[in-house]
Image: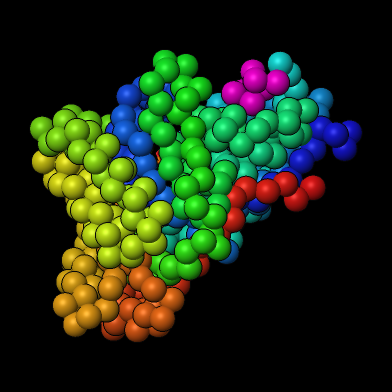
């Protein structure tokens, strides 16, 4: 039945103030708030159809989902079914336009698209905050991909997580910035965000990380409101470097960087010393993402492409939130 089928699209997002640690793992409730920018053109389309099949059938980029990935999708469908009070199994197909292995987590886009398509297919019409809370159950960062532009995911206080949802701080057209991504390796990462976060939570530096988050969020909100690239960029760098410092102090240690990662950071700092406002951030992998103005993007991209070990460079603009396609 057509009413039991829906297709939706969502873009990836890049955290400027990082989410790194949970207050409650089962509901994916974060220890701190976080702020991101949604990126255009790097997204995932998800189609969900509830039917009378005897099991969920899951397909990612044209191949059957397997192992951990399949388990995670099935658990997410169970959450959608529980919310909608339905029991039918589903046919799910996702297709990403995110190049694989570039370290821009497609899981954020995938679970945002699945939350929208899955809830529609199950007959629910959720408002954006409830959609964000649903997407969060699949992957924390997916809560932010429901919205476009600059987005804050609130930590929330409630045990049920209903107040741990994202809100839009500014639409994409309000501030035209660029994010240049330097890909230093396309090898699969050794430690997933989820596992890395768990390890970081036992780091002696973790309490300091959590304690500093509220100040970072206040300053990032003000920088976005004022469209102050230097203030936001310096803060994004600070947040990313603190996040990685927490991992370095963990046991066993967590180090996502490769040699080229560090060379890219130094190259960006040289550009800055020469008068180009450009700022780095790094996620749970070795790629370097650089925030800069549209006018400087090609210079930044050329400088990063010339760093030994950089395999490719791509430039992104701010993007829209999740939308229903059919
Ligand atoms: C470093 O959202 O992938 O990208 O909630 O366990 O699925 P789970 O983790 P995930 O973690 C993202 C971590 C990060 C920082 C961020 O996006 O804020």
Q: Quadrant of residue 218?
A: top left
Q: Is residue 25 left or right of residue 79?
A: left
Name the residue located 79 percent from the left edge and 47 percent from the top edge.
326
Does residue 81 belong to the magenta stretch? Answer: yes
Q: Is residue 211 left or right of residue 186?
A: left
Name the foreground residue: 232 vs 188: 232
Visible residue check, residue 105: no
The image quadrant in which ligand 1 is located = top left
Q: Residue furthest right?
A: 1
Q: Is residue 320 left or right of residue 193?
A: right
Name the foreground residue: 68 vs 24: 24
Q: Is residue 161 left or right of residue 56?
A: left
- Locate the N terminus by quadrant: top right
Name the residue located 18 percent from the left edge and 66 percent from the top edge.
262
Does residue 158 belong to the magenta stretch? Answer: no
Q: Main secondary structure of the magenta part?
A: helix
Instruction: Please state the horizontal and vertical placement of residue 102, each as a whole percent of the image.
Output: 42, 62
Instruction: Please state the horizontal and vertical placement of residue 25, each as a whole percent of the image.
Output: 38, 24
Instruction: Please state the horizontal and vertical placement of residue 74, each as a whole percent of the image.
Output: 59, 29
Instruction: Please state the horizontal and vertical placement of residue 310, each as a whole percent of the image.
Output: 31, 74
Name the foreground residue: 9 vs 49: 9
Name the residue located 31 percent from the left edge and 58 percent from the top edge.
232
Q: Which residues are magenta?
A: 78-84
For residue 306, above or below residue 192:
below
Name the residue located 43 percent from the left edge and 76 percent from the top edge.
294
Q: Residue furthest front?
A: 226
């Amino acid at each position: 039945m057509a009413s039991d089928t829906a297709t939706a699209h969502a873009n990836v997002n890049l955290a400027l103030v990082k989410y790194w640690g949970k207050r409650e793992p089962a509901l994916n409730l974060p220890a701190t708030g976080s702020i991101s920018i949604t990126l255009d053109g790097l997204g995932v389309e998800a189609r969900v159809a509830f039917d009378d099949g005897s099991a969920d059938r899951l397909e990612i980029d044209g191949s059957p989902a397997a192992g951990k990935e399949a388990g995670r999708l099935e658990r997410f469908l169970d959450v959608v079914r529980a919310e909608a009070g339905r029991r039918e199994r589903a046919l799910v197909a996702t297709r990403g336009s995110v190049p694989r292995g570039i370290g821009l987590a497609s899981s954020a886009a995938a679970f945002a698209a699945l939350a929208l398509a899955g809830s529609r297919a199950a007959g629910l019409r959720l408002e954006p905050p409830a959609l964000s809370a649903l997407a969060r159950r699949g992957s924390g960062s997916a809560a932010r991909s429901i919205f476009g532009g600059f987005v804050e995911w609130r930590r929330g206080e409630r045990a049920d997580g209903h107040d741990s949802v994202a809100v839009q701080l500014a639409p994409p057209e309000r501030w035209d910035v660029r994010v240049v991504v330097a890909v230093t390796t396309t090898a699969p990462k050794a430690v997933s965000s989820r596992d890395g976060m768990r390890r970081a939570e036992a780091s002696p530096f973790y309490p300091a990380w959590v304690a500093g988050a509220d100040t970072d969020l206040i300053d990032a909100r003000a920088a976005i409101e004022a469209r102050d690239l230097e203030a936001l960029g310096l803060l994004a760098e600070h947040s990313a470097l603190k996040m990685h410092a927490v991992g370095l102090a963990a046991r066993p240690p967590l180090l996502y960087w490769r040699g080229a990662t560090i060379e890219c950071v130094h190259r960006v700092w040289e550009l800055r010393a020469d008068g180009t406002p450009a700022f780095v951030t790094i996620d749970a992998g070795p790629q370097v993402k650089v925030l800069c103005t549209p006018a400087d993007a090609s210079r930044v991209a050329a400088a990063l492409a010339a760093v030994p070990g950089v395999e490719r460079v791509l430039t992104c603009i701010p993007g829209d939130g999740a939308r229903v396609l059919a």
